[in-house]
């Protein structure tokens, strides 16, 4: 097998060397290969000598020396250098690096078009559950982050070779529908349009106010919930209309955002309705009250009990102490059925998890929601584990993110305190991007040989830049933190922004285009690569490290790592382009540099595509 990237290649060579140093029957040891932080220390380092020294009761420096003597690096690296107490600095040979990116990355290998990223050897069936807005309500900025982040997880995991099942756990069930059904018995339903959700959201507020003031209406609303749940055709019909129109509005937003969710991925809360009763009954059977005195299992236990009329599951640790307590110090249960018989958010999540594990037979579920839901997920994961619905082989990840803040540092709201409407936000992004495109055009108009962009071309670019900017602004920051939503910042041509990245891509494409127009023979994809200038070498090494960034995104679900990589790649390219003439160079140098341009563009495009961002050839 071809090692998918340099890090893997070095790991396997150094592991073998360490095994030799340790002798035959030693367990494999992580060779601790790290990327060097400073070019002085080479490209990579092997840091294993320090910990091995203790084990071998030898000096780290001597162990490093023994590793260096045993490792078979062939043509890969220059002679190793031992630095400090026993760091091994690895500097790749230029010829090796050139050949590596030429063959492995350019697509002549086993994995064409993957820039050296091998498909995983252990493909899993993975659910990525994301977006999950509530019907009859506008998607708010919290759903924006879930939608954008979740989409990247889906793209990256399926790129790596996992079998990804996207799930949109739409909130389409619950007591609020009683109010809406009762309301729409007396009022016209909004027509299917983009504004449908805005209108139903307003209607819901009115219905809720009436519910609190008007006892007769409240009674009708309560009855409507029952009718809906028992399948009454009229109630169902109103509910279905609301769901259908909401879904159409969500899909329009997904399309606008270039998010891969489709209608088929929608499996809303209502889908699990028929499974809730059995789910609750199973929990009752599985978690009887414990007799006092029997020892508690190390994983803790759960108890199903009625509390103030509600059916609850209480969780305990290995010492028999409550795992969760409320702010009042009382133990905090998961309520699975209310006093009036209604099921809750948690009951649906338990039923959904059970369905996914048992019917969809998945190996991993990734839930993408804001950090405020942490406790809910912890608690129902805990129940699912103890119930055996989530066996140890099923990996559960609750992937959270911080809030979107406005320029004033508080959660993003409109001036009158309303939630920001997502489609308005996106339209504004596109309009502002159009202004940036116009400015660029005005600047270019003065250049010799200027050909104006057609109006629809400009509009397409504005869309790519505007939507790309919103997505990239979100993705380029560590998702664990809050992030400040600023149009000015996200649309800036400077810094780690979508316009900067898209511009870098378009610029490289134009260099390549010009060269190919002038002389098609030198723009050949099989031209020999030579890396003589430092900037050429740095760029080549960066390109070769594409797979490392992808690995981190896939392992830790942190898209900002890929953004940071692409930003570094663009910066390395700019440095290369300043220091190394491409079009003016002649013969073999020109051909080699054009290939570097081409590879950079391909890495940028693939990277941005995995982030769900559309590239454009001109900007
Ligand atoms: N509909 C929920 C909300 O808007 C998000 C659902 C998250 N997923 C889940 N399985 N609970 O907050």
Image (cartoon, rainbow, N blue to C red):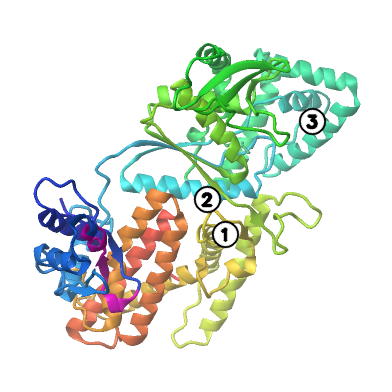
Disc marking residue 148: 2
Question: In the drawing, does residue 173 fall left or right of residue 560?
Answer: right
Residue under the point 69% across and 50% down: 421
Q: Secondary structure at mark 2?
A: helix
Quarter holding ligand 1: top right
Circles 2 and 1 in contact, beta carbons < 8 Å: yes
Q: Secondary structure at mark 3?
A: loop
Which residue carries the number 1 mark? Answer: 470
Residue at mark 2 to residue at mark 1: CA–CA distance? 9 Å
Please state the horizontal and vertical placement of residue 84, each as a whole percent of the image. Answer: 27, 74
Q: Give the percent coordinates (x, y) of residue 89.
A: 23, 71
Kindly identify which numbered label has been placed on residue 601: none
Q: Is mark 3 within 8 Å of ligand 1?
A: no
Q: In front here: 301 or 139?
A: 301
Magenta range: 38-53
Q: Around disc 1, counting alpha carbons within 10 Å, would you say few (fewer than 14), some (14 to 19), or many (20 or more)?
A: many
Q: Residue at x 44, y 65 (%)?
A: 564
Q: Quick one: label 3 or label 2, which is nearer the N terminus?
A: 2
Mark on residue 188? 3
Circles 1, 3 touching at the beta carbon (< 8 Å): no
Residue in the foreground of this view, choosing between 89 and 229: 89
Give SS at disc 1.
Answer: helix
Magenta stretch contains residue 52 = yes
Q: Residue 516 sits in which quadrant?
A: bottom left
Q: Earlier in the sequence, mark 1 or mark 3?
A: 3
15 horizontally vs 426: left or right: left
Pointer 2 or 1: first along the chain: 2
| 55 vs 75: above or below | above
């Amino acid at each position: 097998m071809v090692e998918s990237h340099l890090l893997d290649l070095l790991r396997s060579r150094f592991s073998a060397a360490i095994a030799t140093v340790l002798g035959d029957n030693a367990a494999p040891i992580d060779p601790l290969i790290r990327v060097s932080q400073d070019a002085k220390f080479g490209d990579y380092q092997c840091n294993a000598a320090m910990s091995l020294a203790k084990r071998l009761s030898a000096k780290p420096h001597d162990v490093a020396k023994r590793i260096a003597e045993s490792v078979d690096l062939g043509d890969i690296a220059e002679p190793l250098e031992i630095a400090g107490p026993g760091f091994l600095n690895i500097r790749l040979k230029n010829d090796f690096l050139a050949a590596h990116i030429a063959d492995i990355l350019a697509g002549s290998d086993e994995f064409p078009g993957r820039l050296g990223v091998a498909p995983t050897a252990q493909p899993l069936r993975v659910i990525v559950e994301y977006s999950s807005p509530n019907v009859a309500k506008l998607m708010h900025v919290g759903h924006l982050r879930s939608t954008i982040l979740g989409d990247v997880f889906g793209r990256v995991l399926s790129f790596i070779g996992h079998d990804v099942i996207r799930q949109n756990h739409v909130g389409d069930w619950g007591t609020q529908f009683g109010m809406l059904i009762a309301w729409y018995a007396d009022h016209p339903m909004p027509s299917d349009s983009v504004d449908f959700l805005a209108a139903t959201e307003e209607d819901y507020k009115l219905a809720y106010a009436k519910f609190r003031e008007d006892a007769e209406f409240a009674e009708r609303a309560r009855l409507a919930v029952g009718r809906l749940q028992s399948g009454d055709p009229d109630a169902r019909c109103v509910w279905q209309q609301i769901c259908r129109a909401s879904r159409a509005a969500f899909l329009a937003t997904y399309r606008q955002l270039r998010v891969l969710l489709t209608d088929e991925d929608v499996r809303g809360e209502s889908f699990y309705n028929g499974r809730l009763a059995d789910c609750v009954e199973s929990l009752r059977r599985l978690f009887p009250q414990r007799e006092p005195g029997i020892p508690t299992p190390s994983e803790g236990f759960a108890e199903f009990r009625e509390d103030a009329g509600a059916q609850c599951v209480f969780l305990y640790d290995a010492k028999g102490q409550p795992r969760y307590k409320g702010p009042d110090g009382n133990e905090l249960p998961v309520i699975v059925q209310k006093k009036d018989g209604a099921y809750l958010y948690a009951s649906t999540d338990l039923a959904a998890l059970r369905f996914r594990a048992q019917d969809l037979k998945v190996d991993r579920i990734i839930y993408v929601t804001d950090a405020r839901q942490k406790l809910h997920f912890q608690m129902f994961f805990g129940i699912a584990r103890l119930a055996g619905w989530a066996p140890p082989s099923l990996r559960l990840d609750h992937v959270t993110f911080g809030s979107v803040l406005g320029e004033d540092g508080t959660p993003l709201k409109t001036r009158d305190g309303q939630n920001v409407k997502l489609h308005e936000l996106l339209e504004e992004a596109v309009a502002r991007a159009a202004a940036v495109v116009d400015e660029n055009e005005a600047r270019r108009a003065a250049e010799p040989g200027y050909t104006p962009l057609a109006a629809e071309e400009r509009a397409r670019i504005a869309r790519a830049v505007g939507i790309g900017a919103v997505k990239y602004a979100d993705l380029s920051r560590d998702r664990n933190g809050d992030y400040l939503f600023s149009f000015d910042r996200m649309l800036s041509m400077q810094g780690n922004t979508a316009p900067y990245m898209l511009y870098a891509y378009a610029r490289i494409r134009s260099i390549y285009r010009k060269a190919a127009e002038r002389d098609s023979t030198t723009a050949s994809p099989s031209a020999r690569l030579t890396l003589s200038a430092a900037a050429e070498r740095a760029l080549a090494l960066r390109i070769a490290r594409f797979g490392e960034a992808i690995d981190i995104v896939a392992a830790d679900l942190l898209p900002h790592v890929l953004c940071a990589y692409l930003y570094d790649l663009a910066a390395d390219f700019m440095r290369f382009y300043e220091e190394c003439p491409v079009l003016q160079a002649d013969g073999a140098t020109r051909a080699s540099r054009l290939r570097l341009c081409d590879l950079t563009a391909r890495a940028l495009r693939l990277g941005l595509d995995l982030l769900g961002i559309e590239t454009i050839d001109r900007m």
